[in-house]
Amino acid sequence: MNTHLKNNTISQEIWLQANRDLMAKTIAELMHEERLKPIAVFEDEAGFTVFKLETGFENIEYGFRGQERMMDYWYIDKDSIVKTENGVQTSTLNIPQFFLEMQTVFDLDANTLARYTEELHHTLYCDALILSRGVKSSKELASSNYQTVEHQMTGHPWVIVNKSRLGFSPTDLQTFAPEAGETLKVLWLAAHKDRSAFQSLEHIAQEKFYRSEIGDELYQEFQQKLIGIGKSVQDYNLIPVHPWQWEHKLKIHFTGDIASGILILLGEGNDIYSPQQSIRTLFNTDHPEKRYLKTAVSILSTGNIRGLSPKQMKIAPAITDWVKGLIKDDAYLETKETIFLGEEAAIAYLHPQYSAIAGVPYQYNEFLGALWRESACKYLKEDEEMFTMASLLFVDQNGVPLVQAFAEQAGISIQQWITDYLDAYLTPLLHIYYTHSLCVTPHGENIMVVLKNGMPQRIVIKDFVDDIVLTTEAREKLPDHLADGLIQSSNKENVPLSILLGVFDAFFRYLSNVLHTYSNFPEETFWTLVHECIENYKNQNPHLNERYEKYDLYIPTFKRFYINSLRLKNNGYSENKAFAIPKKDGALPNPLYQIANKNSVATTV
């Protein structure tokens, strides 16, 4: 193991680099969310705008340069960032100190600033560990496999504190964080049916399911253990548990149930799992064809505590069944070979006291549960490999994007690669959106791109049960037993935002910038290809014209999504009975409108 990781030591050079990287990201994202408003001083010979940023202290200011991109986004030259204090300039940056200097500008109370600073320190620590370990080149990753790439990812592109993981110690990070590249085994508990509920697709028999996931021999051992302590096997469900969750949450919060035999530790499973980007989702490395396993890991990560909702566990297989029923026999999606990974089984366990508290913060009901999602590996054909779509934003230490490496591997231009990618990714989303009235959350971590020799073939959609939103048309088809579940309906204004925010702002904003900055591929060309992809779909499906007009993707502006401001402005760290939702407000210029109306300029208000 790398000595930096083994000894938990981080060099000053690495620490300063991590701070500089995060400072550049912070400036870019908070300018995009209109929280930072630096003063443009002049434009240099290279076409960069040089900025001055005032802080809450008269004697401290920052300077940097950036290039404007579409969608009110700026590429920030991280090497240009300097701090001036009492007239003395330094290139040494400290991002927690920066937020302290901006406290009055951001109007942060002491509690919010302290807790956000804690998240910053945790994120910086993880970033520094990644830099200490070393990052593979894009060429190496393009020739590698799904799990190798998964463990090279650096986190959510939009969220500043994207690796806070409050609750994990440094040892935990080296054991359970995806970038550590380590594996784990889950623990299995027997949970009395008075407290637990198992749900699955209709064709799945519970005992056969458990045998397939646990293995026949170990399943029998677990059964004998229950019988040996005088328990009836028929009275219990089995729940896999992340070892961190058992040690840090269950042993204390569920002591009474454990002592009374309502909850019984059976032992460790045999299969070896690899943590994915979300940490709580696990990939079976021993048997890749087996289901993904999603477990509760109650750490604070990217804004929320990551347990598992009993309400969601109750309806997840039913939503899978309903959604797959809607798209069944869809010739267009069959042609595109789009894959929906079904959430086939789930289990939840209710805590006897927390579940009885009206309005209890959500995390107290989400300590114990599991969800099984079908494996994508069984859908791969010969010579195909899949990669998380988040990897398309990866740029190596030499400034080479992974997309460029894929295009070189395929022997095609970046323009052709993006054209093929949009056909594989965006076109099916448009079809699901306009034909079936479904809005999934299609950002990088929820999509996998299937490639063959570097060329995009199709996409795999996962986690669609979590964030699915229905238009009015789809809501009318929703069965009564799902109406009170996690599925949301949306008003006319918000529906297009599933594409405009979920695809354009949350992913294409970054991808177009990466290609423009590092591959000399103009962002206007990128957005022209997006425009052509959408128009091609619309021309092929004129029968949907009424919906194109009702849910218009070519509106001049759309609402901003203040994802970082959730902590810094709107919500702070208040306890809520449900996930905190970032605010949508303001106006963001729509690049589609700008491309389609090149002589028009969309103004923000």
Image (cartoon, rainbow, N blue to C red):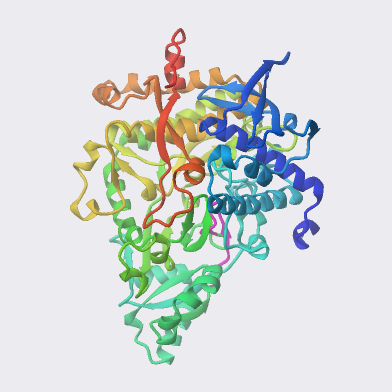
Can residue 136 be seen from the camera position used here? no
| Magenta span contains residue 207 | no
Horizontal and vertical percent for residue 210?
41, 71
Which residue is nearer to you in this view: 185 or 327? 185
Q: Residue furthest toward the top?
A: 599
Q: Nearer the viewer, residue 111 or 79?
A: 111
Q: In the image, residue 388 lies at what x, y percent? A: 54, 44
**Residue 126: x %, y % from top left:** 66, 52
Bounds of the magenta segment: 269-283
443 relative to 216, above or below: above
Position of residue 202 relative to residue 254, above or below, is above
Residue at screen point 56% across, 51% down:
110
- Relative horizontal placement of residue 286, taking residue 294 as reference (left or right): right
The image quarter containing residue 6 is bottom right
Name the side, left or right, on which 441 lies relative to 526.
Answer: left
Please name the residue shown 76% across and 44% down the image.
16
Residue 282 part of the magenta-drawn span: yes
Main secondary structure along the magenta-highlighted residues: loop
